[in-house]
Amino acid sequence: MRRKEGKLVPLEISILAAISQLCQQGKDCYGFQIAKKIEELEGRTFLSGYGAFYRALERLEEMGFLSGQWEDPDVALEGNRPRRRLYDLVVKESITPVSLTDETKPEVLRFGTAEA
Amino acid sequence: MMRNLLIGVTLIFTGLGVKAYLLDVVKAVVLGWVWLYTTCASERGERQRLLIESFLHDEIAYLEDQGYTPAEIAVRIIGHWVRGLPSDAKWGLPFYREMFGRKLLGWSDAVRYFRTPKYVIPTLATLGIMNWAYYDSQNGRPLLGWFGINAVTICMAVLIFNYKRPLVRRILNGLFGTGILSMIGFVVWMTVRYRAYELHDFWAILFAMAALSPVIVVVDKSWRTRLFRGRWWLVIVSWVLIFAASLGSSQAMTGGVKSFFEVWAFAAILVVSMLFVVGIFTLATGALWHGGIKGTAAGLRLISAGLQRRR
């Protein structure tokens, strides 16, 4: 999908909504957990490719919606699995960054913090 | 529709008796693809590889907990993978383009400063022409007789054009020394075997050959240093002595200077004609090669710039 400057694509909006819910539930926000949440929220199979999904997360980080940090290696070692990258919403109370246009705002608010 | 498709494919896989190891194969394929399209993206690529590996691990663990069979999990993973293929390729392509552009730039520099072919190619071209001339003169007989000469010429060309390298210089010095000693030995043998010392022209040719030694001395710095310790005037003195000795021997043996002039005229014509023929071809092929190198380097740089600008 061709991106318009300053606008979010549907996948990014879904990710923000999922992370918002996960944060409220006090759960860790990492790749697979977010994808699972999106499936749950949208009521259908997660339809993104792996790469596209993580690139959307990366863009959201770059745009300042999300902050991400790598999990403590010891925790991953204990779980005998690869390290996860944990995400958090930068503005938790109301997702209204400047770059969010009127067109995308209602979507995020519907899934995200405003509804909660 | 997608869901039905997934169920259908799952049933086919299950029906075919897909084993658990298929999951490992599928995982390897997906990670292999991820490596392929991210390998040129340095840090970002590395990050994506780690993230996707982690995702796959979590996904497989979760689905196994949920009681999915390996075939079902494999189908689901393949579904994700296939859906992402176009987007992944689109994302990875600019990195490949940039990497290729950088490589082209490197090749361009390598071509510009690639000394050996710059000199060896004209030598080979000249050798080729000489081979052809020989072949033509032999009415199509095989060139096996010239194989040794060709091989030695190529080896010598490679050595001479790399004479700045210390190892090559040592080899060349050794070869020059051995060559001179062999020549002296050969001449002595010929002289005794065929009683060449009875011929006046033999002595004149011998002097002419001896006259070549100052050329070697002038061309090769190490020999010059070794023999004359940098005193250039000794080279001139050597030549004067050689001419004087040649003239003296001609006068003493034939009672005139005719033999002297004949031999030196012959030597001069031989050298000049050789230089002319070989020189013309070497210069022509050298110019072509030089132009080719410059053109290729410039072309590679242009393509590289074009590729990198499109990024």
Image (tube, coloured by chain):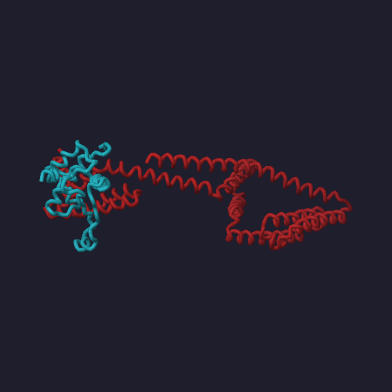
Residue B16 is at least partly visible in this image = no
Q: Quadrant of residue B306?
A: top left
Q: Quadrant of the C terminus of chain B?
A: top left
Residue nearest the viewer, comparing B212 with B188: B212
Residue B239 is at least partly visible in this image = yes
Percent of width and height locating residue B14: 15, 48
Residue at left 83%, top 51%?
Answer: B260
Residue at left 50%, top 47%?
Answer: B109
Q: Is residue A1 left or right of residue B198?
A: left
Total marks in image: 0
Q: Quadrant of residue B20?
A: bottom left
Q: Is residue A69 left or right of residue B126?
A: left
Residue nearest the viewer, comparing B174 with A30: A30
Letter of the chain in red: B
Percent of width and height locating residue B98: 39, 44
Q: Residue furthest left?
A: A116
Q: Quadrant of residue A80?
A: bottom left
Letter of the chain in cyan: A
Above or below — where is B309 with respect to B14? above
Residue nearest the viewer, comparing B218 with B17: B218
Q: Residue furthest right?
A: B255
Q: Quadrant of the N terminus of chain B?
A: top left
Percent of width and height locating residue B274: 69, 45
Q: Is residue A24 left or right of residue B212?
A: left
Residue nearest the viewer, comparing B138 with B213: B213
Residue at left 21%, top 45%?
Answer: B80
Residue at left 19%, top 61%?
Answer: A79
Percent of width and height locating residue B145: 62, 50
